[in-house]
Image: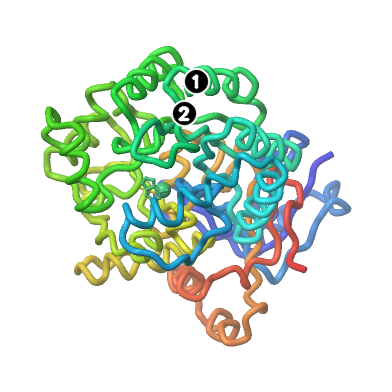
Amino acid sequence: MMKVFRADLLTMKDRELFFIEDAAMLVNEDGKISEIIEFNKLSDEFLNEVSDLRPCLIMPGFIDTHVHYPQTNMRGSWSGSLLEWLMDVAYKEEGKFRNETYSKSIACSFLDNLLSNGTTTALSYGSSFKRADEILLETAYEKGYPLITGMVFMDREVDGNLKVDAQKAYDDHKTLSRKWRKKGRIDVALTPRFAISCTEEMLNVCKAIATDDNDIIIQTHLSESKEEIKKVRELFPESRYYLDVYLKYDLVKEKSIFAHCIHLSDYEWEILREKGSSISHCPSSNLFLGSGLFNYRKARDLKIKTGIGTDIGAGTSFSLLHNAELAYYIQKIQGYNMMPVDLFASITSGAAEVLGLQDQIGTLEKGKYADFVVIAPENDSNFLERYKTEENINEKLFLIIMSGQERLISRVYISGNLAYKKG
Ligand code: GUN
Ligand code: ZN
């Protein structure tokens, strides 16, 4: 049976904002959009199927290009900069994922947090424990949540209990892949944590996996802090630049997603462009750890696909709207005044391109999944008056981003099914 949703609708079309006042969005039984039209053009046969969401605004579900499931419970923990924070806080928490009961409870809380913030697809890091990652995959699958994740590979510079030797990492990854790779809307990503925590043997395992499974998403961290770069130099003296480490093991590909990319040399920028790889920019995390200021203008000028990541739990908020707000500040302080449309793209259509899923998600249009967020301006009385009187859609969108945290989101749909409703 066809479902019909009635509301104002905002999406991206041909890299511009596209707004329809009082739209009807028709969704077929596969959970995909079959048509978007003005409501007054809707044929009478569908009038009984209409879910009337007025006076809300619907927009594409947000896409988180970088988040850590096992860090859900450690947001906002006081520590030093990146490498200290990893040792003192992150690895300690991740060690708890040896326990299945704990993993299950965090998997549920992780998915609930994504949903209540309007995130309808996420690329997440798993833990070092295969069972904990399987629990996340199973939980997402049962809920119909489109999740991409992979077991984190680490075999050095980390607490002993999180180390996995290279052969076991290979075997566990293959076991997870056999069951979960492209299973419905779930997928598995190859996830070497970063150069520092991987020996050459581990990087060779990654190379073997990525060669064998040529279109798998590869996610890792790159050039987040100066201290990290220095350590990479020490550990890989033969590599002139950080990215050379990944390059040496054929891990810089079209479906490679590098988080942070704050302190890149021109050489590294050029390699990313040439290889068609993507960047996940993580504003909240970069500010929290004091890692530095990402150069969004450069990514844009070089046409490097870039999306935003919450990077929970160095990032403190699951909200991509809030992270887009912080992205705006980070650019503005560097003299680049980002447009609302570019902020919006970085959490919707642009993020879909980063994941290589632009044919399925990221905009509301015929043939894509009906993953969408229902924004209710009346949930915030301060915001409501300005929203109502503002005619320009750019201004409306900017208002949503600047004040648009969780409270504005009243419902979230995935594949046309209600996945979250505000309490
Ligand atoms: N680099 C390697 N691991 C991590 C992590 O968990 N968080 C952040 N922000 N950077 C990392
Ligand atoms: Zn991260």
Residue neighbourhood size for the residue with mark 1, other residues' Cα within 10 Å, grouped as few (<14), some (14–19), many (≥20):
few
> Furthest residue to the right?
48
Give the structural element (helix, strand or loop) at label 2.
Answer: loop
Residue neighbourhood size for the residue with mark 2, other residues' Cα within 10 Å, grouped as few (<14), some (14–19), many (≥20):
some
> Furthest residue to the top?
212
- At label 2, the amino acid type is Val
Of residue 348 and residue 77, the one placed in the foreground of this image is 77
Q: Mark 2 points at which residue?
A: 164
Q: Disc 1 versus disc 2: distance between alpha carbons?
A: 6 Å
Say which residue appears at 44% left-offset and 73% top-offset: 395
Q: How many marks?
A: 2
Q: Are marks 1 and 2 in contact (CB under 8 Å)?
A: yes
Q: Looking at the rendering, in which quadrant would you find the C terminus?
A: bottom right
Answer above or below: position of 179 versus 140. Answer: above
Horizontal side, residue 97 vs residue 164: left or right: right
Say which residue appears at 26% left-offset and 70% top-offset: 332
Horizontal side, residue 336 vs residue 189: left or right: left
Q: Mark 1 points at which residue?
A: 168
Residue 283: image location, x then y, percent? 37, 60
- At label 1, the amino acid type is Lys
Answer above or below: position of 156 versus 339. Answer: above
